[in-house]
Image: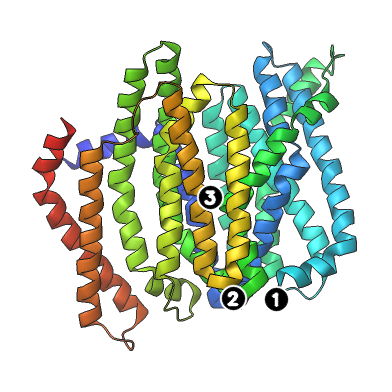
Amino acid sequence: MINRLLTKAITFFSSDLGIRFMAEAATRAGGFVITPLLSWSLGAIVFGSYLQIMSLSFAFVPVVSAGLGFTVIRRIAGTRGTNEAPTLLLTAISIVTALCLCLGLLLLVFGEQLVSLLVLDALKSGLWLAVAVPVLAWLFAVEAMIGEYLRALIKARTSLYIQLASFGFHMASLAIVLLIDRLSLETAFLSLGIAKLIVIAIALAPVLLNIKKFGVKQQRDTGILRIAVSGAPFMLAGLAEWAANLGDRLIVGRFFGSEIVAHYGAGIMLLSVITALGAPIWWLLFPMIAGGVGNGNHDECRQVVKYHTMLFAELALPVLALAVLVSNPSISILLNSPVTDMQPVILLAGIAILISQLTTGWEYFIVSVSAGKRLMSATITCSLGGFLLALYLAPVWGLVGIAAGTLIGKLCLGLYYAVGANRNGFGGTVWRTGPMTLLIALNVSAFFIASVLIEQTTSTTTSATYTLIFSTAIFASIYAIARLCLMKPLQHLRT
């Protein structure tokens, strides 16, 4: 029995899906290491500033990459041979480098104002920001570009290995910093930068060797500047994606300071498990939808989408309910700081993430049947609209207002996906209504029953660790028993 389970596990984790799962797990695990490490050692304010600088760096990634991650890679995918591809990649990286230098000069001039505007409590000078943000933006942009480059050459597994290696080198560099007892905000970023730089160097080595082997031949017309200009819409889409997923950290910092950013960021990190669960499922879904659309079989698309969406819902709904239930003790433990009022915020933010994930089937269907220009416009409008609404609601409703603004943006985009997919022939929802209703009712009921039991058996003096363990055990027990009882009704509703 054990040997059979071990064989299945080895087979799964050696497959493309298994490696994708491990890569996603490694990406999320990094946050669960950094959060308590910085918070317990340096304080929540330092960790909050870390999140703000990371968010700011990611904000500039679409700008400095100029859409090249999509347009140049599309050109690479269209080349039959690989001789032109390395030259295109290195040319794109050189453009990113030039833009990052320009960004550094701008931040050198306006860095002090930016530190004051974003309330970066752990920074005393804008000079450090003028160096750190462009360097981080360059590392993130180039690493993402290399990943797209490998996928364009149909080397998706290699790109996943790079993702895993990036996590491994980051953890190793952090371990060295801890061994020499030099942990600080600066060394935390330095360890991240060194890890990314090593991975980029390893990934670029074959590209440079390929160019050296075949020589840099005269290209017919790379049209790199024209390609860069054509990447402007992708730049806007990247900014919109940042606004929808990471921009809220800067809003929180602007109005409430770095310590509250730490509380908010730790809560969102708990919810990132939902995204990690969805990534391997949606990774398999897109080629299936594309195949169904290519064959003109929309009914097959619907069935495949509903199967994957329900698989995700069965995994994600209890994770969301549990994350909301244990949000206060979990964040308190992660930050070594008492937190008592994060449940409403985590609930709204979690629903926003859930909606974004559940509507993936509609999104992929629209991409498969149309050119995607309207989809890009809708994504930009809804994402930036949600960001601006969160900015407006922040001083009125606090963190709840920020989460509400994000949720409204996701709702509007999800509604567009639904309408657009059905107008193009999808027909209906991406989930099975009966089982979905029952699953939601099950999780809501388990949440409220567990909440009542926890409230009656714990007090304000109960330790956060005990509350976390007890809450998790209570919810898991209630959910498991109820899920077992509803197994037959769920099977009946699926048929």
**Comparing marks 1 and 3, which lies closer to the viewer?**
3
Choose between 41 and 335: the one closer to the eye.
335
Measure how far apart labels 1 and 3 are at the Cα level: 29 Å
- Give the SS element for disc 1: loop
Q: The C terminus lies in which quarter of the figure?
A: top left
Choose between 384 and 76: the one closer to the eye.
384
Q: What residue type is labelled 1?
A: Asp
Colour setting: rainbow
Left or right: 317 with respect to 127? left
Using the image, tell me which numbered label, if any, was put on residue 434. none
Which of marks 1 and 2 precedes in the sequence?
1
Choose between 461 and 146: the one closer to the eye.
461
Left or right: 351 with respect to 107? left
The answer to whether any part of residue 259 appears in the image is yes
Label 1 sits on residue: 121
Which residue is located at x 83 percent, y 65 percent?
111
Measure how far apart labels 2 and 3 are at the Cα level: 26 Å
Up-down relation of residue 92 to residue 59 (above or below): above
- Give the SS element for disc 2: helix
Label 2 sits on residue: 259
Q: Where is residue 477 in the image (x, y as percent from the top left)?
A: 17, 62
Q: Where is residue 372 in the image (x, y as percent from the top left)?
A: 59, 26
Which of marks 3 and 1 precedes in the sequence?
1
Which of marks 3 and 2 precedes in the sequence?
2
Label 3 sits on residue: 409
Up-down relation of residue 323 to residue 25 (above or below): below
Q: What residue type is labelled 3?
A: Gly
Q: The N terminus lies in which quarter of the figure?
A: top left
In contact (CB < 8 Å): disc 2 and disc 1: yes
